[in-house]
Amino acid sequence: MSVKSKSELSSHKGTNIKLPLIIFEEGGTIICYCPSLDLSGYGYNEKEAIDSYKYVMAEYFDHSVEKETLEKDLKRLGWHITKNLRKNIIPPPVTKLLEHNNNFKRVFEKFDYKKLSTNVRFPAFS
């Protein structure tokens, strides 16, 4: 899954990163949750939930790039960002997410879920 934000459409700069998505059902609704970004989408079925998630993620990137808050927000979420040559961004490991992300911990402990891996193209930021 490669989500292109408006800001990315005008630039081919960016970084591809593999992220986990968790699909689970709560209250009759299918939820697609990305613990690394603490974002989710939902729908009546898995396809709708994934499509909703893509939209939410694109809006997140558009907003955070426009406001120049992407780097700060990723660090808040536990991402490691290095300043070598081009910025290298590394998502937090699942063990850290379980320690610090109460949403993910609740899903992990309470629900049956399916894990998917997806490639996400992060917009470039300085």
Image (cartoon, rainbow, N blue to C red):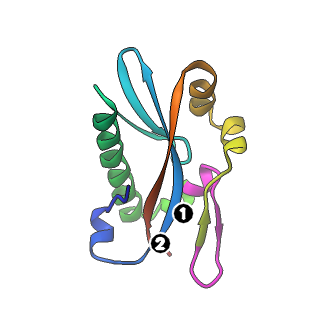
Q: Position of residue 19 (x, y in %)?
A: 53, 52
Q: Residue at x 61, y 51 (%)?
A: 76
Rendered image: mark on residue 43: none
Q: At label 1, which amino acid type do we have?
A: Glu
Relative placement, left or right, of 55 versus 26 is left
Q: Is residue 89 left or right of residue 69?
A: right
Residue 125 percent location from the top left of the image: 47, 72
Q: Which residues are magenta?
A: 74-87
User: Amino acid type of disc 2?
Assistant: Phe
Q: 46 or 4: which is nearer to us?
A: 46
Give the x, y percent position of residue 64: 41, 58
- Asked if labels 2 and 1 touch by Cβ distance under 8 angstroms, the answer is yes
Q: Secondary structure at mark 2?
A: loop
Instruction: State yes or no: residue 28 in magenta.
Output: no
How packed mark 1 is, by other alpha carbons closer than 10 Å (few <14, some 14-19, many 20 or more), is some
Q: Is residue 57 above or below residue 95?
A: below
Task: From the image, tell me which residue sits under label 1.
Answer: 71
Q: Could you say whether the residue bearing mark 1 is in a helix, strand or loop?
A: helix
- From the viewer's perspective, is residue 27 above or below residue 78? above
Q: Residue at x 63, y 29 (%)?
A: 105
Q: Residue 90 is drawn in which quadrant?
A: bottom right
| Disc 2 target residue | 125
- State the CA–CA distance, disc 1 to disc 2: 7 Å
Tell me where residue 53 appears, x and y as whole percent.
Answer: 36, 42
